[in-house]
Amino acid sequence: MYAKVIPAIRLPKSFGEYDYAVPPQYRAHVRRGSWIIVPWRGRPVDALVIGISDRPSVDPKKVKDILGFGAVQPLSADLTVLPELIATNCFVAPTTAVKAFLPTTPKTKVIKELDEDPTDEPAAPVASNEERLIVYRSPREKSTWLLRLIEQTKGDVVVITPHKDEVEPLSKMLTEQQDLPVVPLHGAMTAPAVRRTWHQLLAAPRSIVVGTRLAAFAPVRQAGLFVILEADSADLRQYDQSPRYDSRQVARWRAAVNGATVALLSHAPRLEEYARVTAGLATLKAEKAENNTILVDIAGNPRGPNQPLSPVVMNRLEDSLRNGQKVLIFHNRLGAAGALFCRDCGRVFRCPACKVVATILESSLRCGRCGLEGPLPAQCPDCSGLNLGRAGLGTETMAQALRDHFPDNTIASYDSAQTPEERQVALATADILIGTRLLVHDAAESGPSDCWGAVVATDTDELLAHPGFRVTEDAWRTVRLLADIAATAGSELLLQTTDPESPKIRRLLQGLTDFMKAEIADRQLVGYPPAGELITITVRAYDAAQAEQAASALRKRLEDTVGGLNLAGPLRHSRPYRDGQWRSVLAIKTPQVQPPLAELLKTLPKEYIIDRNPESVG
């Protein structure tokens, strides 16, 4: 008896299945889905059994015996199919896919002694496969939907949230509301903790798993429901290593095999999910939202650059505070100012790693992308000039300006540098809160819901000023979240803009159906997802010129061997220098991924990062 296995190690993409002999004492226990330990170049390696055969595909004399088991119970069928699906979708080796989710077993924990009776067969599907897209408007409504979905489910439940900080409060809430054991699973857990969690889930008759995107691989015995919270979040995708899987898609694959339901909950869904609704692959549940948004024209604002709030907005703030209500101000620029520059030579101070403009804090410069922080310079390193200037009003400067105007009120800037506890205190106690998208997220998902007398966006035009094919969608989603925060409290959203009649600004006020139809039509004209496939290839090298040359060579190879592609690049990566290497990006647009392109991508070195339908180009 021989087992065909995929070892959990990183190998070239042409490497996949391997044969191992099953000793007589293990033959009653090894089956498709078994988590076993095999010898690999003198060391034990975790592996997944994907098939059983009577004879190996190589000389039997060269086939080694398996060493034992990582767990007594086999993985369910919906987990066993993932390596091949991820490998095909993400253009990686199946071994890389297995390594992405299968825990590591220490030598001392290899299971070698088993009971005489074989393990139970995996459970049968619990229902017919269904996908539901649910739009909610408040934290309370989100919790109500989550509990309702769980109560309607017979099998195991997997709840996926994009943010690690939300795992603990979610687990606590579900523990108080449900009789089932609630098990956390996220990427910040240690390797031994993840392995223990897997053993717990494989042995449990039924569980609720709460975690980040890693929870998409939770080895529950009988998955009945996958709930994706904040289903529009970019953090639901793997972004820091290969394979670049999407936990939403992993949940769909598992649900299709296991007959489970996938429920995607969000304030404002992505175009990809809405397109599945229009294609009949999912159902939509969304209440019609009232138009509670007012455009405020700030062209010629008499208050000047140091006070970006219009008289109309200031009057609304005064009324809200007088009535004992709170104020939320979305200002998408952190710190004391947006940039530091030299007035003598024109140098702009940037992050040495990311090359993006650094934000000025009270006494330091901090990169808003990677978090690298350094001292605030006293002079220019290029010309030694002392004439340094500041550009752009940051959240801290705005907070100080408002303190001068409202000395009797508590005013706080909301920053990712603060701890989650500090941010929660600010949400609960401050009269005026000023922050970026982090504030919008926390207020919409977990903050107080009925206390806002005014919700303000200081610069709506800035939301559309960034590059990228998702810029309008992201801006609409931000406006939708702000409108939901205001509507839950029975107030209005005030959007400041220099051009209230602009069609682009007006589109941000559209409801779900109208916006999605218009935006999908625009995507169809240019071939971006969901109207087409977008693939980015990130080439890495220890020299910037070498990275660009390698990307150029790859582009020529694609042009020579694969036709019908829309190619762009080499492009500058948003973080061109990271982890000691330079990055250059090649982007491919195509209606469909045809076999010649797929085969070529499978031949690329594993050091190249391939991202299919990413959130952004580079």
Image: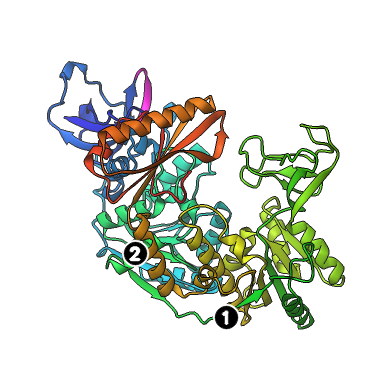
Secondary structure of the residue carrying tag 2 is: helix
Whether 516 is drawn above or below 372: the answer is below
The residue lying at 18 percent from left, 35 percent from top is 52
Residue type highlighted by circle 1: Asn
- In the image, taking residue 447 as reference, residue 526 lies left or right, namely left
The N terminus, quarter of image: top left
What's drawn in magenta, residue-wise? 41-46
* Distance from the alpha carbon under mark 2 to that under mark 1: 26 Å
Q: Residues within 10 Å of mark 1 (few under 14, many from 20)?
A: some
Examine the structure image and report whether residue 359 is included in the region drawn in magenta: no
Give how far across and how far down residue 357 sits, in percent.
Answer: 67, 44
Q: Residues within 10 Å of mark 2 (few under 14, many from 20)?
A: some
Q: Nearer the viewer, residue 546 or 25?
A: 546
The residue lying at 69 percent from left, 67 percent from top is 329
| Residue wearing tag 1 | 292
The residue most toward the left is 54
Q: Nearer the viewer, residue 182 or 577?
A: 577
The residue lying at 57 percent from left, 28 percent from top is 580
Q: How many marks?
A: 2
Q: What kind of colouring is applied to the model shown?
A: rainbow
Give how far across and how far down residue 42 sits, in percent.
Answer: 36, 17
Residue type highlighted by circle 2: Ala
The residue lying at 20 percent from left, 33 percent from top is 27
Residue 111 visible in the picture: no
Q: Quadrant of residue 414?
A: bottom right
Whether 515 is drawn above or below 289: the answer is above
| Residue wearing tag 2 | 275
- In the image, taking residue 85 as reference, residue 410 lies left or right, namely right
Give whichever of discs 2 and 1 has the lower sequence position: 2
Secondary structure of the residue carrying tag 1 is: loop
